[in-house]
Amino acid sequence: MASWATNEELRQYLPQITVTGDNDDLLDAILLRATGIVRDALRSLLADPTFDYAAYGAASAKIVRAYDSAYLSLPAYQLSTVTLVEYQSGSTPSTYTTLTSDQWEATASGSLYRASGWYSGNNARYRITAVWGYGPVIDSARELVLELAVNIWRSKDKGGFTEIVGVDGSGAIRAIAGLNPQQVMILENIRNQISQVWV
């Protein structure tokens, strides 16, 4: 698992930290934990246990099931990279026949359009060749990782307690580290952007 932000980016938020090997190791570990928190939250929001940001790789084929509709929803992929669409034309062993490029069209939302519809039932399997995945980390996710990492660093010796919130003395309140409402909203916005493209 790779972190979605770098040690150097985190140091811009924590300039007071002395550069030492031990501090660098601790910052790297904190970035990994913060990345894990954001990744797990997005996996839950997307209902996709495999979600992760990563650089796009080479094109490959993936089997997609169709339902009665003129639109075929695809798993996350790099837009404009669908190069081949095939339908299952036989089984035992499975065989596929290519649809010509004038029989389907990639939409701006990421789904594939076919005027005659995508068949369902026993022949609902399509083999799609594209560049699959969610792509590189987006800025809002990287920023959220950095915010969480800063909070983890600052609360590491306090166990989630702040020294003073509110009036000093009996008016001080306990503050628990975690995702605040604004950060949850950012996660939901990321989820909505991904869902609008891929579902």
Image (cartoon, grey):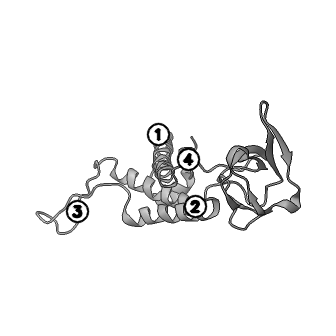
Q: Are marks 4 and 3 in contact (CB under 8 Å)?
A: no
- Label 4 sits on a secondary structure element that is loop
Of the residues shown, which amino acid type is indicated by label 1? Answer: Asp
* Nearest to the observer: residue 186 or residue 8: 186
Of the residues shown, which amino acid type is indicated by label 2? Answer: Ser
Of the residues shown, which amino acid type is indicated by label 4? Answer: Ser
- Label 2 sits on a secondary structure element that is helix
Q: Are marks 3 and 2 in contact (CB under 8 Å)?
A: no
Q: Which residue is mark 2?
A: 195
Where is residue 190? Give x, y as percent: 54, 62
Position above or below: 43 against 90 = below
Q: CA distance from mark 3 to mark 2?
A: 41 Å
Q: Which residue is mark 3?
A: 164
Q: Which residue is mark 4?
A: 3
Position above or below: 130 against 96 = below
Any part of residue 43 in sight: yes
- Label 3 sits on a secondary structure element that is loop
- Residue at 53%, 60% in the rendered image: 191
Left/right of residue 188 with respect to residue 82 in the rendered view: left
Q: Which residue is mark 1?
A: 22
Q: Earlier in the sequence, mark 1 or mark 3?
A: 1
Any part of residue 15 in sight: no
